[in-house]
Every structure is written in structure tokens, then in C-alpha cells.
């Protein structure tokens, strides 16, 4: 298992379009990918505790994190392609999901 901290830098946070892109990327890997708020914010979605995190392949679970700009998340991946999964998701967050027109926090 690999874990990495990521920061939501997009001005609009992890909104529907960004969440859909995250789910699409995570779903391309065999590894189990989990997101968890590192700041202890928002209540965990039904079926998950804040310690467990949420399935990054479920758009509803990702949206329930209510991750706004500045939210710190932990991404965990476990499986045969965990390195590639973590790196791909880290890249999404680093580039603010490719939404340059939306602006991002510095």
C-alpha cells in the first residue's frame, strides 16, 4: 500500500467535473484507491468512517468529501499497479484537474 498527501488547489474545489475526472482516472487501475480528508473535515459518507476514507472510483463518495480549495487529502492505493495509480492521481491534483480557466490557489 502507498499513501500520499495531495492538496486541492482548484479555486472551485473538487466539484463534479473534477470529481468525474478523478473517478475516471482511478477506475483505469486495478488497485483499490481510497481518498480521505487529512484535515478531519466533513463527515464521512455513508458506509465509511473518516479513518477508512472513500472509494475514489465512486463519484458520489468523492463528492461527499466536500473538498474545497485548500483541503488536504490523503490518497491511498493498494494493488499491482498502485505506483502508477498514485502518480496519476497526484498529477491530476498538481495540475488542478486541467482547469486552468477556473484559476487555482497559489
Image (tube, rainbow, N blue to C red):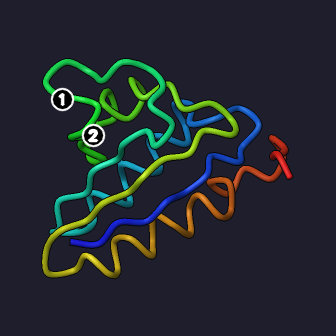
93 horizontally vs 2: left or right = right
Find disc 2 in the rendering and name its residue. Answer: 53
Q: Do labels 2 and 1 touch, CB within 8 Å?
A: yes
Quadrant for residue 26, please give it: bottom left
Q: Residues within 10 Å of mark 1 (few under 14, many from 20)?
A: some
Instruction: Measure how far apart labels 2 and 1 are at the Cα level.
Output: 6 Å
| Closest to the observer, 31 or 24 | 31
Measured as percent of width and height from the top left, residue 5 is found at 49, 59
> What is the quadrant of the N terminus in the image?
bottom left
Measured as percent of width and height from the top left, residue 98 is found at 68, 57
Residue at 48 percent across and 47 percent down: it is 73
Residue 101 versus residue 82 in the image, above or below: above
Residue 72 versus residue 95 in the image, above or below: above
Find disc 1 in the rendering and name its residue. Answer: 48
Residue at 30 percent across and 60 percent down: it is 76
Measured as percent of width and height from the top left, residue 49 is found at 21, 29
Residue 4 versus residue 73 in the image, above or below: below
Element type at mark 2: loop
Residue at 27 percent across and 40 percent down: it is 53
39 horizontally vs 27: left or right = right
| Closest to the observer, 58 or 8 | 8
Residue at 26 percent across and 47 percent down: it is 57
Quadrant for residue 92, please give it: bottom right
Compare marks 2 and 1 and give the one earlier in the sequence: 1
Element type at mark 1: loop
Measured as percent of width and height from the top left, residue 47 is found at 13, 24
Disc tally is 2
51 horizontally vs 9: left or right = left
Q: Residues within 10 Å of mark 2 (few under 14, many from 20)?
A: many
Quadrant for residue 58, please give it: top left
Amino acid at each position: 500500500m502507498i499513501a500520499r498527501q495531495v492538496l486541492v488547489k482548484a479555486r472551485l474545489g473538487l466539484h463534479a467535473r473534477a470529481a468525474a475526472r478523478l473517478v475516471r482516472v482511478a477506475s483505469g487501475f486495478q488497485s483499490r484507491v481510497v481518498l480521505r480528508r487529512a484535515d478531519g473535515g466533513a463527515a464521512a459518507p455513508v458506509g465509511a468512517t473518516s479513518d477508512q476514507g472513500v472509494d475514489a472510483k465512486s463519484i458520489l463518495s468523492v463528492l461527499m468529501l466536500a473538498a474545497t480549495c485548500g483541503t488536504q487529502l490523503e490518497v491511498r492505493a493498494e494493488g499491482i499497479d498502485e505506483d502508477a495509480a498514485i502518480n496519476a492521481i497526484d498529477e491530476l491534483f498538481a495540475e488542478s484537474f486541467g482547469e486552468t480557466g477556473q484559476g487555482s490557489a497559489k
